[in-house]
Image (cartoon, coloured by chain):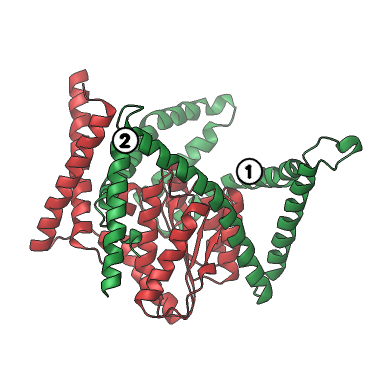
Amino acid sequence: MNNHRLLHFLSSLTVISVGVAMLVGLSSDWGTPAASFAAFVLRLVTVIAAVAVFVGVFNLLAVHLGRLARSERGWPYSLLALLTAAGVIALRILDRAEVWSGDLEGEQMSARAFEAVQVSLESALAGLLVFFLVYAAYRLMRRQVTIWSVLFTLAVLVALVGWIPLEETSALADARDWLVRVPVSAGARGILIGVGLGTVAAGVRVLTGQDRSIRG
Amino acid sequence: MIDNSELIWVVVAITFAAMMTGRFIARRFTVRLRPIRAYETLPVLAADAVESAKRVHFSLGDSALGSASTVTALVSAEIAYRMSERLAISRQLPLLTLTSPMTLPLAQDTLRRAYLYRRTMDYYRSSTAVWYPPGLAFAAGAASLSADLDADSNILLGRFGTNLALLGESALRHSQTVIAHSDLLEGQAVAFAQAREVLLGEELYAGPAYLGGTALERGSVLAQDVLRWLVILGIIAVALQAI
């Protein structure tokens, strides 16, 4: 019990002291000891972030290996993920070794594979998003008709129809422009200010060592 | 003229003072927070998941320690912890997905602490906190994993873009409940359209106060309100000055 309390005390002390030192450092003039300390800690974080990517990849591989070993539902996808990961790592190693010859000489095959698979897949999925959103608006109206769901659906309709390049819909295009410029802009700012205020309040809670996530 | 660094200290000082006053009030009087349906639903979802021996999928999205969304990640993890405390009596571990490898230890520790608290560490496995690469790859991976594990509900709190639509769509197809929030506008819009209950803007940061919060957490909700009114008064004053 005493060890636990000591751990709580030390972790709270570390968070408060580093947090306050960073706050002082980031608001100090460049070149002062406090600013140098803040810059040093930020560099440290960058290095840790780079190492953490390895941890992330290792975690992903471990999760899929586990699913494969236990033959959980969807294990073929896990197998595919593992084989793809191994393939891309192998390609990267071959790229670094500059083994490609002929037409492929000097090419980065891992980057090509990324462009060919990942980028095109992401673009295709991004294209589907608009249909998801329209369907979501339809479902929202089916689930519960409130003033807010009606407003949302009307805004979606005005925005979508307003994009149609026809003379007959020019009034809707103007309505769309007004919608984006006035109520959407005001609402967006309101939400962002709210997020900012929430961040400040929660940040001060962390700085005072009251956030439980920092304790052991 | 106040420069940025002075303004930061002024804001921190006002927030701290408001928070301490809020804590004082919360300790001596009964503070009634306005009802937020998402926070009323969360404990019910946890109870349903335990009773039906199903899993709950939490996602922190792109919120990450060491970035602009650090506080969002911490608060989302704290809400996941409060929920995991309730779920830790079951052998069905919650699933926690995210895109930031820096935040992975926080996610694992969040679940570990919940199982440690319930003294059910035998059930705990660190592999239920899962990292995916960011973007649509995350949405596709997390959605399929949640569907494969037959999760009862998806609680998506943190930083999401439009890729939230993929997660939401998959959840709705598999009859899973969705509770969502995003500190990005596009994600917030998708959350509003798809989620059964949505948390708007600053409501996420009040989460710990609603889920069995301490006096200080309830005090920080008061601090948020004080800051909000100061901003409103500031905007009105600037607008009047401009006329």
Q: Residue furthest top?
A: B243
For the question of whether residue B28 can be seen, the reply is: yes
For the question of whether residue A211 can be seen, the reply is: no
User: Mark 2 or mark 1: which comes first in sequence?
Assistant: 2
Residue visible at 38% across and 75% down?
A: B116
Q: Is there CB contact under 8 Å for labels 2 and 1?
A: no
Say which amino acid is labelled 2: Ala
Position of the N terminus of chain B by quadrant: top left
Say which amino acid is labelled 1: Gly
Image colour assigned to chain A: green
Image colour assigned to chain B: red
Query: Residue A144 at x, y = what percent?
Result: 40, 58
Up-down relation of residue B219 to residue B42 (above or below): above
Of A199 and A92, the residue lying toward us: A92
- Chain for mark 2? A
Query: Residue A212 at x, y = what percent?
Result: 31, 61
Image check: A100 left or right of A7?
A: right
Tell me how far mark 2 sits from mark 1, CA to CA. 48 Å
Count of residue discs: 2
Image check: A39 left or right of A134?
A: left
Disc 1 crowd rating (10 Å Cα; few below 14, some 14-19, many 20+) is few
**Residue identifier under label 1:** A127
Q: Secondary structure at mark 1?
A: helix
